[in-house]
Image: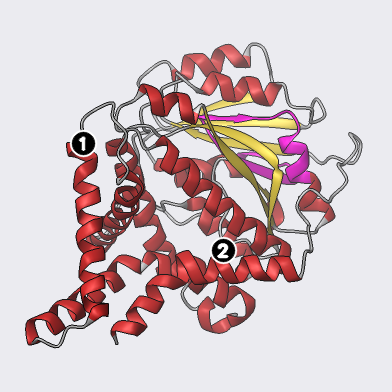
Amino acid sequence: MLIVGLLLLAVPYVLFPAALGLLARIFPVRTVGSIELLTDDECPAVDVVVAAYNEEKVIGRLLQSLGESNYPAGKLRIWVGSDLSTDGTDEVVRDWISKNPLISLVRMEVRTGKSGIINQLVGLGKAEVVVGTDANIVFTPDAVRRLVSTLRQRQAGVVGGRLVYQSAEDRLAATPGSIASEERHYTQFESKLKQWESDLFGCTLGVEGGCYAVVRSVWQPIPPATFMEDFFVSMQVLRAGLPVLWEGQAVAYEDVSADRHEEFARKVRISLGNYQNLARFWPLLFTKPVPLGILFLSHKVLRWLFPLVALGVLGLAGWNLFRGTAEVLEFATLSAWALALTSWISMSLWPKGQHNPLQPIGYFTALNAALLLGLARYLRGVKSSVWKPTERTI
């Protein structure tokens, strides 16, 4: 049983990525960036939807980047939903409306959370394509055109773009204990998996909530109090049998996470949303086993269950040690657990301003601790998806 548990732990982070990478080398069907960009006349109308709460520091940069997009003038409508912001977010948006009449501000009557805002904004628009984003995103000039071009030419239901963290190294140097570098590497790892899934199967497991496009005709309202609404959007399209693709040349920039405490809280919210979506989509493991079910299990489900399996492996190793039957595998397992906990604790105790070689392991441990806490919160019941954004530093 211990060997089975260890193999299950290896699948999402070692065996599955290695298998995808090998297939990508054997079948190099590079679809990313292979499309021709639509001409101005070919470009359909687009509604950009943004949910914002107290984002006065960053939302102006988002609106500026969309205004500088090379997408045809008059075909890009921007809808900003303010979730009863109490800072200057609404005033910043109104100032941009005076410069661009295709921007609209919708202030919620009560706080609804991101999923509720997106549902309302999508309902107000009429464009053929909906682009979802966040207030702290900065689009490159051709990002929207690339998303829409891939969506139309590949006849996909959803196309996700690539998010790049800004100034990661500068932020890492300026903030003691920053996890900017670990966040960047984890994001790069995820982007590579999504590229391979898209290239090989046309079945990307999840898109970035800050940069994706969906065909309005396949849009389904997001259930109330949903976190990780971007994953819901892509999975319901995959369930309908349409491709969900990753377009790595549609690039947008995001403010990097620097504070490990704020990032941990964000990871807990993400984890809660993961279990919501697992409860909704687990039947796909059996109703659409190839390739969707296999990808869903290997890329997402086993990753979400990783801390539970790890606890089971720890219990087995500890029981064998207690009975006096422990061998090398049990001692290695217990040593790995001790290293993981030591690394996580060291993130708080390490002298500020000094390099911590254990921080990558501590980051991975914190990632799985957030999964456990997110599961606990999910099991208690979720009544609202209102949120507080992480502190913006640029």
> Quick one: 9 or 163, which is closer to the camera?
9
The residue under the point 63% across, 76% down is 291
Q: Is residue 364 above or below residue 163?
A: below
Place of residue 125 in the rendered image (x, y in percent of width and height, measured from the top left): 66, 39
The magenta stretch is 123-148
The residue under the point 20% across, 55% down is 341
- 30 left or right, relative to 216: right
Query: Callout 2: few (<14), some (14-19), or many (20+) C-alpha neighbours within 10 Å?
Result: many
Along the polypeptide, which appears first: circle 1 or circle 2?
2
Q: Is residue 143 above or below residue 201?
A: above
Q: Regarding mark 1 in the picture, which secondary structure is present there?
A: loop
For label 1, the residue is 350
Place of residue 203 in the rendered image (x, y in percent of width and height, measured from the top left): 65, 65
Residue type for callout 2: Met
Residue type for callout 1: Trp
**What quarter of the picture does the N terminus occupy?**
bottom left
Q: Is residue 129 magenta?
A: yes
The residue under the point 26% across, 60% down is 372
For label 2, the residue is 235
Residue 215 visible at all: no
- 129 left or right, relative to 379: right
- 126 left or right, relative to 170: right
